[in-house]
Amino acid sequence: MAKYQITLIEKMSCILTTCFLLSIVLSTHAEFVKKTYIIHMDQSAKPDIFSSHQEWYSSKVKSVLSKSVEAEIDSSEEERIIYSYNTAFHGMAAKLSTEEAKKLESEAGVVAIFPDTKYQLHTTRSPYFLGLEPIQNTNRSWSEKLANHDVIVGVLDTGIWPESESFIDTGLKPVPSHWKGACETGRGFRKHHCNKKIVGARIFYHGYEAATGRIDEQADYKSPRDQDGHGTHTAATVAGSPVHGANLLGYAYGTARGMAPGARIAAYKVCWTGGCFSSDILSAVDTAVADGVDVLSISLGGGVSSYSHDSLSVASFGAMERGVFVSCSAGNSGPDPVSLTNVSPWITTVGASTMDRDFPADVSLGNGRKFSGASIYKGKSVLSVRKQYPLVYMGSNSSSPDPRSLCLEGTLDSRTVTGKIVICDRGISPRVQKGQVVKNAGGVGMILTNTAANGEELVADCHLLPAVAVGEKEGKDIKQYVLTTKKATATLAFHNTRLGIRPSPIVAAFSSRGPSLLTLEILKPDIVAPGVNILAAWSGLTGPSSLPIDHRRVKFNILSGTSMSCPHVSGIAAMIKAKHPEWSPAAIKSAIMTTAYVHDNTIKPLRDASSAEFSTPYDHGAGHINPRKALDPGLLYDIEPQDYFEFLCTKKLSPSELVVFSKNSNRNCKHTLASASDLNYPAISVVIPAKPTNFASTIHRTVTNVGPAVSKYHVIVTPFKGAVVKVEPDTLNFTRKYQKLSYKISFKVTSRQSEPEFGGLVWKDRLHKVRSPIVITYMPPM
Ligand SMILES: *[C@@H]1O[C@H](CO)[C@@H](O)[C@H](O)[C@H]1NC(C)=O
Ligand SMILES: *[C@@H]1O[C@H](CO)[C@@H](O)[C@H](O)[C@H]1NC(C)=O
Ligand SMILES: *[C@@H]1O[C@H](CO)[C@@H](O)[C@H](O)[C@H]1NC(C)=O
């Protein structure tokens, strides 16, 4: 526990520092400097004299406008309001001075005011690896047939590249009748770019423009067209149509397809060259829910502050109430503990893991030793495998100065690197950028070595010069050779694509880790899915390395990140929704979590790439997604919107913070949950307080039978060192479909442990294994 505790405190103070800094900025800003604020309104407080909420919002803003000359000239209240939100969220985004924001905060009907904040964007073998596809099958597969349905997935991202073959709509039925969305047009994006696959496309930029100035329409496409590539990649991973012979420069050759090739895509562009803003993200979620999306795929994250201050948390609560499944990326801040974003229990938080595919490359040293690494380099300037090239390393074998600052822009002298292979450590600047710095300085190749944080995890990049990524151990050995050899030499060799890698999957080193900063009783992340070296469709405006200097154009690109794992889960959720349209978002999430596996393809427990040790539920949540099983989970842990609200009631939110979620004021705390652990979550996490020594507690769960009407389940619980865990009853006998049965889990502490303990609970019948991870956290004595 000690390790996690310390980090919790560190993160907390860092968040407090941010808040602190923010408030200083707010109060020292000139009176007339306007910023965007997101204003939560209590809808039910609208006086009858206003015919619409918009009218009421305008009047509220008008009442607080500064009576300065400037204010009268430049801004009517209409110009001040950049969004009004009506579906998943109630309120507006408005440009206000600090003074005005303060005044508005005390107005009746105003629930809360937050400054707009910036979010960050946090890709084929994955269908086969996930068991969705026989490897050689020209017929439409069962999953494709299943997926030709009316499910629509909204993707909040950088837009979409509509010409990609992944978005061809051949064979799809007409646009579902429940769809109320639109196809917004603009530069490079016309009505015909929407089709039966891309059923909607919209842009959200008012918050971005308010913060950064007008979008430069020469540099950026102020339309749903995706310049960056990230949005095209994620959308294609969710629901791309099958494309045969997809590859990146010959690597990863095969059929590329999304998880739910029959589902439809609606692209909501919220990210621009300079970032993504919460006021735009909120408007996109609000609009998408009104448009009729069934699933939202959001590969974005900001900081974690609180349930009520995080716009994405609040907006996704509204989406969940309307039956929309929301999946979000966990973040790429691993392997540090407590590094997750998007931790609200109504969000499905997705971490990243590897597949059984590699892009091997070798480093051969002058002393005859050979090291294996990874690369997706393909270009004219291949190095000869028969020749040796001078090898240099600018660092020393001591750890200071910071080796990660090697190979940053302007740090390499062409006199020392021309014609040589250069060793660079990962970190600080993008990996492909370091390659470019070496190339610009005249280097002929690069060996990119992992730091301790990356361990042995190999992320393949589309470098502009011959480059091989190697693990931390290999890196150390190669550096040692250079530092101890007068004329060190090496050469690099590239071996394309290798399949069947064991062990796999492995939790990616970069995947953000639990526990959740906000609630130890809700285990996060929820699940891991493929997020390392993923091939999917790409923008025609950006090279595969994303560097401006990269003039190569490719139809598919290979990317890594939890941004890539999130759309895998979104697509699988769409498949489940297609098969079971009546299931709630919580039921879909339960099906995904309770069928996940926690063993790799060597039948050993899942491992963590950063340490090569076994991973824990703080790394992998319920485990690795298993889509075939998720379609038939046997039992479900369902959660109603009111139950999530009751969860918030246990969190001691202030009345005004609760109003953010209760909106129409028809939700009240009924105190049906004794503690956060009692939420009917598919994972179980209990916190043992420091006292009394022999602490005992009981939590409750209810399962719904979605398997055969007559089903008999019995329970299996892993043993724990520090507590006796008992389940009552230990058998569940169902006699009808959708029947609900409850059970109790009691925890009795016998010997306190210094670290959290991990295990699991499985309900088993002849056909199903319904597994929940269990985490027991022992609080240290004060
Ligand atoms: C495709 O389906 C047809 C008809 O069901 C069958 O005869 C054929 O063998 C299948 N081909 C493959 C490659 O599975
Ligand atoms: C650095 O290299 C020198 C020369 O091989 C060696 O004597 C020394 O022990 C190394 N130091 C570390 C910290 O590895
Ligand atoms: C379920 O049925 C079994 C016999 O098939 C019985 O032993 C068990 O007590 C029953 N469980 C409950 C909770 O009724």
Image (cartoon, grey):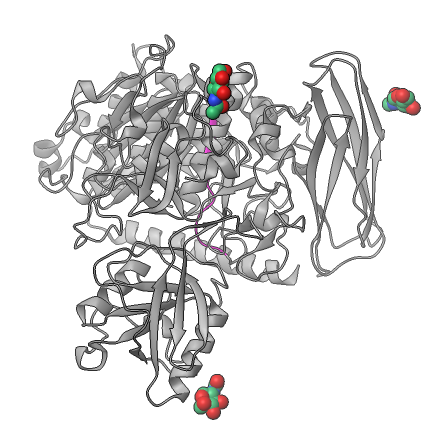
Residue 588, quarter of the rendered image: top right
**Eyeballing the image, is 488 above or below 230?**
below
Residue nearest the viewer, comparing 41 with 290: 290
Identity of the residue drawn at 56% across and 16% down: 580
The residue nearer to you, when weighing 561 against 88, is 561
Q: Is residue 512 left or right of residue 739?
A: left
Relative side of 612 to 94, left or right: right
Write the start and end of the magenta stretch as one range: 324-334
Examine the structure image and report whether residue 520 is included in the region drawn in magenta: no
Q: Position of residue 164 (x, y in %)?
A: 26, 31
Height in image: 151 above or below 621? above
Q: Is residue 236 left or right of residue 542?
A: right
As for residue 331 lying within the magenta part, the answer is yes
* Quadrant position of residue 264: top left
Residue 139 picture quarter: top left
Q: Quadrant of the N terminus?
A: bottom right
Identified at 55% across, 37% down, the residue is 653
Q: Residue furthest bottom?
A: 486
Q: Position of residue 459 (x, y in %)?
A: 41, 56
Q: What is the tally of numbered marks visible in this picture?
A: 0
| Residue 714: percent from left, percent from top | 82, 29
* Position of the C terminus by quadrant: bottom right
Is residue 192 something one can see in this rendering?
A: yes
Residue at (81, 33) in percent of width and height: 715
Residue drawn at the location 74% of the way across and 55% of the way down: 690
Residue 62 at what x, y percent from top left?
Answer: 22, 26
66 relative to 383 in the view: left or right: left
Closest to the observer, 607 or 618: 607
Q: Is residue 103 visible?
A: no
532 up-or-down from 526: above or below: below
